[in-house]
Amino acid sequence: MTRTRLRPGFDTVDWSRSACRDLDRDMFFSPSTEDEALSVCRSPCPIRLECLNYALLRPEQYGVWGGLTEAQRRVTHYTKHRVRCPGCAGAVVDRTLAGTETCALCGLSWRV
């Protein structure tokens, strides 16, 4: 039996449903427009969690993805138990035996 690592491809997310679909993509990769990009991501975007999970699993090193900056996403890769979710700052984080943690409020999960 072959074990494969789940690495979502860019084409596995339906980007046409995103809140940023008609915006200039450069806005999400420039420090001067980071606040504007964050506000777009945090608006009611139907694929925000899919986008964030894509960026965390790739891992994307640059830009704003799913409402988190580069620095915020880096925090999720520390090997320690989190008290708060890096996505929504919720305090209800469940640790599983499979080496992941999941936020009970927004559903974001990450490896530990």
Image (tube, rainbow, N blue to C red):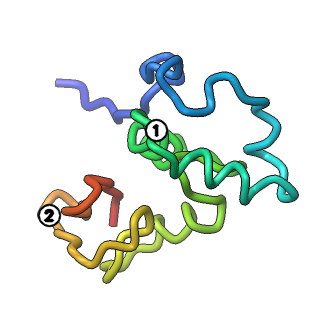
Task: State the quadrant of the N terminus.
Answer: top left
Q: Is residue 18 above or below residue 42?
A: above
Q: Is residue 56 left or right of residue 110?
A: right
x and y percentages locating residue 18 in the rendered image: 52, 29
Q: Is residue 96 left or right of residue 84?
A: left
Q: Nearer the viewer, mark 1 or mark 2?
A: 1
Residue 96's mark? 2
Residue at left 43%, top 29%?
8
Residue at left 31%, top 73%?
90
Q: Is residue 1 left or right of residue 11?
A: left
Q: Is residue 60 left or right of residue 104?
A: right
Given the image, on which type of amino acid does mark 1 rest?
A: Cys
Element under disc 1: loop
x and y percentages locating residue 29 in the rendered image: 78, 46
Mark 2: few, some, or many residues within 10 Å (few <14, many ≥20)?
A: few
x and y percentages locating residue 32 in the rendered image: 87, 57
Residue at left 42%, top 20%?
12
Given the image, on which type of amino acid does mark 2 rest?
A: Thr
Which residue is tagged 1? Answer: 45
Q: Nearer the viewer, residue 46 or 70?
A: 46
Residue at left 18%, top 69%?
95
Residue furthest to the front: 44
Element under disc 2: loop
